[in-house]
Image (cartoon, rainbow, N blue to C red):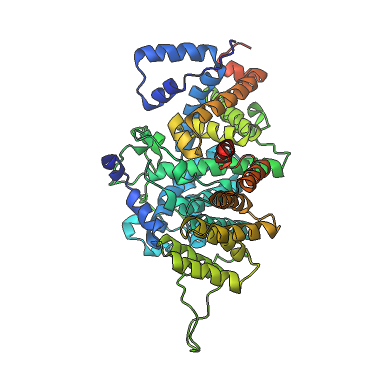
Amino acid sequence: MTRVDLHPEELLDAERRGELAPAERVRLDAHAAACAACAFERAASADFEAERLRERPGDEVLAGRIAEATAQAAGAAPLEALAPEHRRPHVGPARLPWSRRLLVAAVMLCATAAAALGGFYVAGRLQPQEPETVAPPSSSPAARPSSPEAPPPAEAPAARHAATHPAASETPPAAPPDEPAPPAVAPAAPEPQRRVRPAASADPAAPPPPGAAELLAAATAARRRADWPGALELFRELRRRFTGTREELVARVTEGRLLLEQLGDPSGALALFDSYLAAGHGGTLAEEALVGRALALGRLGRADDERATWRTLLREFPTSAHAERARARLEELP
Amino acid sequence: MPTVMSADPWKQVANQAALGDRVAARRLIDGVSPTLLRLVRTILGPGRRADVEDVTQESLLQLLGALESFRGDCTVAHFACRIAVRTAVRARRRRQTRDAATTADSVAVDESPAAGGMADDELAAERRRAALRALLDELPEAQAQTLALRIVLGCSMAEVAETTGAPLNTVRSRLRLAKEALRRRILEDPALAAVLEVDQ
């Protein structure tokens, strides 16, 4: 076995796209004959693709149950709100064990924070990268067209095999049997549509003032609408009324980002990031707070403090999605 | 690439969901959940039904949270799959940290209960899948993510760079290091080497 350090990744790409020229195939085959890793990659790619496309009995029901639970957690519309042609078979309410419902709630909080951060916050460090760091190829095979008549949830590689592997459809031909309900667990309550208004009225018929989660959702929605002042007001109301709650801690970081990126107030942002980090709770947004702190310090021209913050980020979060950015910035700083 | 992008049947739904359209969000969730379910199961491996449900849900929620940053450079479905790959790889690693005595991937494929009914080709394929899953837990995370996007999802180098936010040369370097680890694993596993018909 010859050790091969240079792998013909472009040829492997071309092979995946079905665009390998005969001469290139000869080169790739010759390389793979001597390179166990590339031989493995070629074989395993096919293995995994076959596995990804393999439907198993009960998948439709399970996917429907997962979708229902996710929709409830995310505050998406109920199944009945969809046009009939868009409905998946009814599988009954999602009835998840408490442990999983708690997980969903935690993830949803992170997802809300991610949305609130406009893609900056990498929830659990699982999110896509910051938009400005992405330079996708316009010729991405994933961007290939697919049939608009049958919206395919299958990803691009699967689409390449659409002829032999039918993609999942939104409208399966027949409804599967109802899923048996797990015992003694109440279905998760659907999230109400969050619509927040300042509670200025003393009218007893007026709705109760919004809670922390509602305020955070409303602030996020305002930020999505580019209503920066409205978002800021809601974030501050949340921080004032619900100090110390998880939502309020999230708001420290999200408001910090808003101040930093939209409202040109790095000093105010820095104070919020520091406040979050000083809380010492090991919060899930510590990584993002550190990044925000470094960026704010950069805006303020405090190079020494910025450098120290980027180093802290790399030390405490060595696999951070922002690690490359931190290293690049450390090289730039005097 | 406006022509290509407009052909993505989920693009408009995703745009509406990103703007807070709850019906569109539901359509998107329902539409991509079967694909993500299968993808997550592929990465987590057999015998992980509860984890598969959790991680698929987590992926869907991450997708909804990330829609605003979606720029339409790939299809929505592929965007969702990339998120699911990253989520599932991280979930594997969290689980491994939490439960150092994981057994599913350490049990030899030949000895697994399902192996008896497998054809030789399928047994070889499962051996390769198990080897890669185990490697995903051992590699540094950036390398694991790169390898999973590459082999499990079939991403091109450029797509991996886009998904991970790393420069192409960094991706190339990560992949080289991951392949070196892969090569060592193959050579340490006679059965795997035999499947690939490589000399030891």
| Left or right: B135, with A94 as reference point | right
Residue toward you, A277 or B108: A277
Instruction: Give the x, y percent position of residue B166.
Output: 51, 35
Residue toward you, B43 or A84: B43
Instruction: Give the x, y percent position of residue A87.
Output: 37, 57
Residue toward you, A78 or A197: A197
Q: Is residue A148 above or below residue A190?
A: above
Instruction: Give the x, y percent position of residue A216.
Output: 53, 66
Q: Is residue A32 above or below residue A255?
A: above
* Residue at 50% across, 15% down: A32
Could you tell me if residue A181 is visible in this image? no
| Left or right: B39, with A304 as reference point | left
Residue toward you, A262 or A135: A262
Q: Quadrant of the C terminus of chain A?
A: top right
Q: Quadrant of the N terminus of chain A?
A: top right
* Residue at 64% across, 20% down: B184
* Residue at 45% across, 32% down: B155
Could you tell me if residue A49 is visible in this image? yes
